[in-house]
Amino acid sequence: MSEEAFRQGSFFGRRKGKRLRAGQADLLEDLLPRLRIDRTGPVDPRTLFARPVSEVRLEIGFGGGEHMLSEASAHPDVGHIGCEPFVNGMAKLLSSVQERGLDNVRLHDDDAVELIDRMADASVDRVVLLYADPWPKRRHHKRRFLSDETLARFARILRPGGEFRFASDIDHYVGWTLARVLRSPDFVWTAERPDDWRRPWAGWPGTRYEAKAIREGRVPSYLTMIRR
């Protein structure tokens, strides 16, 4: 299937890949509506969960869901919000959410910017962006999710002292991100030594995209930024 460009807000890319299995299609019909965040009106993340949560974390473009599932399982007291417009990735995550009986996950299956712009100020403790599409061609750089405007959006919803975590195996995209972080008045990059951005975070489960990058000889970088 050739990739079709989809544009809404800041998202470019495919909405669907391989044909879904019957069970996955059923989950999209039955489970997703129960976990989907309302698409209208303001959003207070801490009110989205059936029980009180100690933190709220937002993961943008969770892909196959490996990282989000690991975090949600390891931290049942934390509320996890996942954004992923790619249907196959959403279906894969839903299967695991059901199998594990997770009740601390809420989902948005559309453009992440649309949700972020409705979220309350200082209402999130961590924002995670892992292996986002680097759009390597120069004429496509404007399609990259990370921008000065996106950072400003993250700053608004993050509490002071909250984290923005970014990982990529594309050096140019890492440099692009750092350039925007370093000129932002809202964030501080925490690295003090080279190994600080070469080592993944504690409890890191890895992702299938990361495994592919390592097989192909690319070295991932892991950046942590703190909201001032």
Image (cartoon, rainbow, N blue to C red):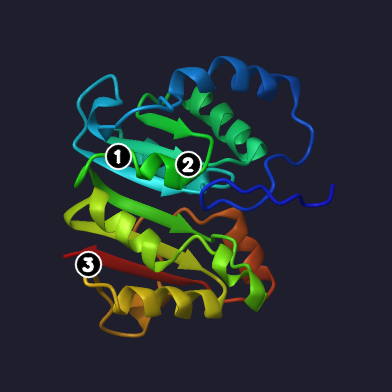
Residue furthest to the right in view is: 1
Q: Nearer the viewer, residue 209 or 172?
A: 172
Q: Which residue is mark 1?
A: 119
Q: Nearer the viewer, residue 168 or 219?
A: 168
Q: Picture quarter containing residue 135?
A: bottom right
Q: Nearer the viewer, mark 3 or mark 2?
A: 3
Q: Give the mark, 1 or 3, whose residue is nearer the N terminus.
A: 1
Task: Indicate the secondary structure of the residue bearing disc 2.
Answer: strand
Mark 3, Cα crowd under 10 Å, few <14 / some 14-19 / many 20+, is some
**Above/below status of 111 relative to 141:** above
Q: Which residue is mark 2?
A: 83
| Residue 77 can be seen, yes or no | no
Going by the numbered disc 3, the residue's amino acid type is Asp
Q: Are marks 1 and 3 in contact (CB under 8 Å)?
A: no
Mark 2, Cα crowd under 10 Å, few <14 / some 14-19 / many 20+, is many
Direction from residue 53 to residue 92 in the image, left or right = right
Going by the numbered disc 2, the residue's amino acid type is Cys
Direction from residue 134 to residue 186 in the image, left or right = left
Q: Which residue is mark 3?
A: 186
Task: Indicate the secondary structure of the residue bearing disc 1.
Answer: loop
Total marks placed: 3
Question: Residue 228: x and y, percent?
Answer: 16, 65
Direction from residue 44 to residue 222 in the image, left or right = right
Question: Residue 32: x and y, percent?
Answer: 53, 23
Mark 1, Cα crowd under 10 Å, few <14 / some 14-19 / many 20+, is some
Disc 2 to disc 1, C-alpha distance? 13 Å
Identify the residue shown where x is 38% and y is 62%.
149
**Above/below status of 12 relative to 53:** below
